[in-house]
Image (cartoon, rainbow, N blue to C red):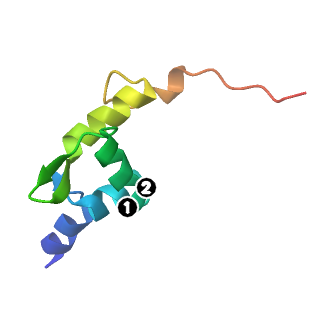
Amino acid sequence: MALAAQVQTQPREVMDIRQAAEYLGISGDTLYRYASEGFVPAFKLGNRWRFRKSLLDGWMDAKSGQNTVAAPDVEKKKPVGRAK
């Protein structure tokens, strides 16, 4: 039973518009518009939009300017001074 609950909390590889919108943190209407305009990687299965998690992750990395999936090393960053 615990395994079933764990599987449902993780995003699926292929998501519908509602699942993908929740994953991206945007509304379903906005995601529908982005998919229709070709702004996000998506494909239609029948007349329904589908989104591959791996392609969305790569798209977000490209849009954010990150070339790698790894998280930045926090220890190497310099502390930010206070504004005067």
Task: Judge whether 16 appears above or below 35 on screen.
Answer: below
Q: Amino acid at mark 2?
A: Gly
Q: Position of residue 47 (x, y in %)?
A: 14, 60
Figure quadrant of residue 77: top right
Q: Which residue is mark 1?
A: 28
Which residue is depicted at the point 13% across and 79% down?
1
Q: Nearer the viewer, residue 78 or 16?
A: 16
Which residue is depicted at the point 14% across and 73% down?
4
Which residue is depicted at the point 21% across and 60% down?
16
Residue 72 at least partly seen: no
Q: Secondary structure at mark 2?
A: loop
Q: Position of residue 17 (x, y in %)?
A: 27, 59
| Residue lying furthest right | 84
Label disc, if present, on residue 25 of the rendered structure: 2
Figure quadrant of residue 61: top left
| Mark 1 and mark 2: Cα distance apart in space | 9 Å
